[in-house]
């Protein structure tokens, strides 16, 4: 390689961004994205400051309001941002906190012994990304106010007047900058789920949410805290014991709070939090909980001869089958892995959680032998199923059914073996499968036809699932295994695309497939490998050929308006993929240049778990209520 020594590169080429300019230049580094997720993150950052006040025992009421113009305010009755002149910046502390990154009260443990705002960038980032922000503070018997725009103060801190009564608090009003964000439309449901979660995690705190755009108001207040959270998660499930195991202990500067209850389901739902932050990837608190739970239940089973002497110990998967648990730790100096704070890294927390769970779960089981026996019997039943599943896998391997070298006969595989570019379509029925095989680009697209509706895994354990030919075919085709043996590194395709008919049966098959992937291969969804294909509903035909495809009723109406009145046309309704010829199927649904793929994401694990339990579980009443509530929103139904 030849060096270009003629290139001029000097001091004038170095760009220095000051104040909050770096935030506006690279907003994604601070809030993740400039899409809807990043927009909502602004509210969370301001909200976190109010929650930190609550953790410090100062605040017990937070009001979040969305105004008709899309602006937002977060008001709390905490201590109020200090208004005095800051000794280093020579500006008011309010201006310092709102205009300087990493300025806040969270870098020592004097003001906040526990804080979620680890990086100290929250409210200043919100200020940088808002076209208008107003901070109103109640403190020292007075009301103070200062205005900002795009990260810069546009007024000095001023006193609006005296307070009539002794009160303190902070109100942050802001309007997100349309120059920064792809959308400035806040989603009520997204925010309400977050606020509900915060209220669960901080018992006794009242969070009021007002949306003036839709004339909505909700109040979240849970005296039971995470016990109420477990009840909420299990409301669409069937618990096998009434009493929720609840542990709330302060040990070695760490508050450990755990609530758990077993249900008759075959999957586990365990949520973990550190300083109110949802640690979606777990961490040391989860490791401590799991090791203690497995050991304690095994010790209890051995002590009372429920687990026989010659029997092997229960595995972690055995003791967590049907478990719903919420683990919340609060500690002075949390160490999160990565800016996203998705995983707790404090090594000492594992030991603290382990010892707390061991001591208090042992006591609970001793004091509640009936519940102890119910939990042990559930775990022993899970172990028997696991053993049956292992034998089925071993037998299948001998027959080359689950061997990765013996792909299912119905699979039309692709030529390319590079799993970064390949994709597999899960297609219902042989007819649609045949069209898809003829339509595909065989270099990188594989087709797996599935006959009929697959097993509802919400009502079956792994050993029963392995008797299903369709499920075995998917496990084999994907190549990553299942259950304890699942390894995403062995996945043979980058995209797993569910392609079903746009009717009720197709929607049911899609839900069955998503339930299977969510319960037994969730990492595929979490890592962004699962998609749903969206075939067109209509084709507008002129002069014996399709001139336009429409993917929903709204698009059809728009297309018909655009057609000239004197034009002769025919509307073809596609009731199934098998009705399309290969050329149509390729052009509309499989061609990467034109197709519409919906990426499946888990934005709210609690809501996703609740939805699958409600749609596919054994409880009929929640499903009936859901259908009644949502029937009016269905645009079309094909028999």
Image (spheres, rainbow, N blue to C red):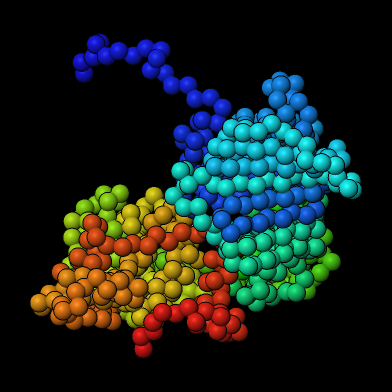
Residue 464 vs residue 90: left or right? Answer: left
Residue 486 screen position, x and y as percent: 44, 57
- Report the residue at 72% width, 63% height from top: 220
Count of numbered badges drawn on the protein = 0
| Quadrant location of the C terminus in the rendered image | bottom left
Instruction: Specify the farthest residue to the right.
Output: 165
User: In this orientation, which residue lies closer to the viewer: 549 or 117?
Assistant: 549
Residue 243 vs residue 379: left or right? Answer: right
* Residue 129 makes an appearance in the image: yes
| Quadrant location of the N terminus in the rendered image | top left
Residue 586 screen position, x and y as percent: 20, 66
Q: Quadrant of residue 52?
A: top right
Above or below 285: residue 241: below
Instruction: Specify the farthest residue to the left.
Output: 543
Residue 115 screen position, x and y as percent: 71, 41
Q: Quadrant of residue 312?
A: bottom right
Q: Quadrant of residue 320?
A: bottom right
Instruction: Specify the farthest residue to the front.
Output: 161
User: In this orientation, which residue lies closer to the viewer: 260 or 438?
Assistant: 438
Above or below 265: residue 487: above
* Residue 449 makes an appearance in the image: no
- Report the residue at 80% width, 63% height from top: 223
Residue 196 screen position, x and y as percent: 67, 61
User: In this orientation, which residue lies closer to the viewer: 16 or 449?
Assistant: 16
- Report the residue at 28% width, 81% height from top: 575
- Report the residue at 24% width, 52% height from top: 417
């Amino acid at each position: 390689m030849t060096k270009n020594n003629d290139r001029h590169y000097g001091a004038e080429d170095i760009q220095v961004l000051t104040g909050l300019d770096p935030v506006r230049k690279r907003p994604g580094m601070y809030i993740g994205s400039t899409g809807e997720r990043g927009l909502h993150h602004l509210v969370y950052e301001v909200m976190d400051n109010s929650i930190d006040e609550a953790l410090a025992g100062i605040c017990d009421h937070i009001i979040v309001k969305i105004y008709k113009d899309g602006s937002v305010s977060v008001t709390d009755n905490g201590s109020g941002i200090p208004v005095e002149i800051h000794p280093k910046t020579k500006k008011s502390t309010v201006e310092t906190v709102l205009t300087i990154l990493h300025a806040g009260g969270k870098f020592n443990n004097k003001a906040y012994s526990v804080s979620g705002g680890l990086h100290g960038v929250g409210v200043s980032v919100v200020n940088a990304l808002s076209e208008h922000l107003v901070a109103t503070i109640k403190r020292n018997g007075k009301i103070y106010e200062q205005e900002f725009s795009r990260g810069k103060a546009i007024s000095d801190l001023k006193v609006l007047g005296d307070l009539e009564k002794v009160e303190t608090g902070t109100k942050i009003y802001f309007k997100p900058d349309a120059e920064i964000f792809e959308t400035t439309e806040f989603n009520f449901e997204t925010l309400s789920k977050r606020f509900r979660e915060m209220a669960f995690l901080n018992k006794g705190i009242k969070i009021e949410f007002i949306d003036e755009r839709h004339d909505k108001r909700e109040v979240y207040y849970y005296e039971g805290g995470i016990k109420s959270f477990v009840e909420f998660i299990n409301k669409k499930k069937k618990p096998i014991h009434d009493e929720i195991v609840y542990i709330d202990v302060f040990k070695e500067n760490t508050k450990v709070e755990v609530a758990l209850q077993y249900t008759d389901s075959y999957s586990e739902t365990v949520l973990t939090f550190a300083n109110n932050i949802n640690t979606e990837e777990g961490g040391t608190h989860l490791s401590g909980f799991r090791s203690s739970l497995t050991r304690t239940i095994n010790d209890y089973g051995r002590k009372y001869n429920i687990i026989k002497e010659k029997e092997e110990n229960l595995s972690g998967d055995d003791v967590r089958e049907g478990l719903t648990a919420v683990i919340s730790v609060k500690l002075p100096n949390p160490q999160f892995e990565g800016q996203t704070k998705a995983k707790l890294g404090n090594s000492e927390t594992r030991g603290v959680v382990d010892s707390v769970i061991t001591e208090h779960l042992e006591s609970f089981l001793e004091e509640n032998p009936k519940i102890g026996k119910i939990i042990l019997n559930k775990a022993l039943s899970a172990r028997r199923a696991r053993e049956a599943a292992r034998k089925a896998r071993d037998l299948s391997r001998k027959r080359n059914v689950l061997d990765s070298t013996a792909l299912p006969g119905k699979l039309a595989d692709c030529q390319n073996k590079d799993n970064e570019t390949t994709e597999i379509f899960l297609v219902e029925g042989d007819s649609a499968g045949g069209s898809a095989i003829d339509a595909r680009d065989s270099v990188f697209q594989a087709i797996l036809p599935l006959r009929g509706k697959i097993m509802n895994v919400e009502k079956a354990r792994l050993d029963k699932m392995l008797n299903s030919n369709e499920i075995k075919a998917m496990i084999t085709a994907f190549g990553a295994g299942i259950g304890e043996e699942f390894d995403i590194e062995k996945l043979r395709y980058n995209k797993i695309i569910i392609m079903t008919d746009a009717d009720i049966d197709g929607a049911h098959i899609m839900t069955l497939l998503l339930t299977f992937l969510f319960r037994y291969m969730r990492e595929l969804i979490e890592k962004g490998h699962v998609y749903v294909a969206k075939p067109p509903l209509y084709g507008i035909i002129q002069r014996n050929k399709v001139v336009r495809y429409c993917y929903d009723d709204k698009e059809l109406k728009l297309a018909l308006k655009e057609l000239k009145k004197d034009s002769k046309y025919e509307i073809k309704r596609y009731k199934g993929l098998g009705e399309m010829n290969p050329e149509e199927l390729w052009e509309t649904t499989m061609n990467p240049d034109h197709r519409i793929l919906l990426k499946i994401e888990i934005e709210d694990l609690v809501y996703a778990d609740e939805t699958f339990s409600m749609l596919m579980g054994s409880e009929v009443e929640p499903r009936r209520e859901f259908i009644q509530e949502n029937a009016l929103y269905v645009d079309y139904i094909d028999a």
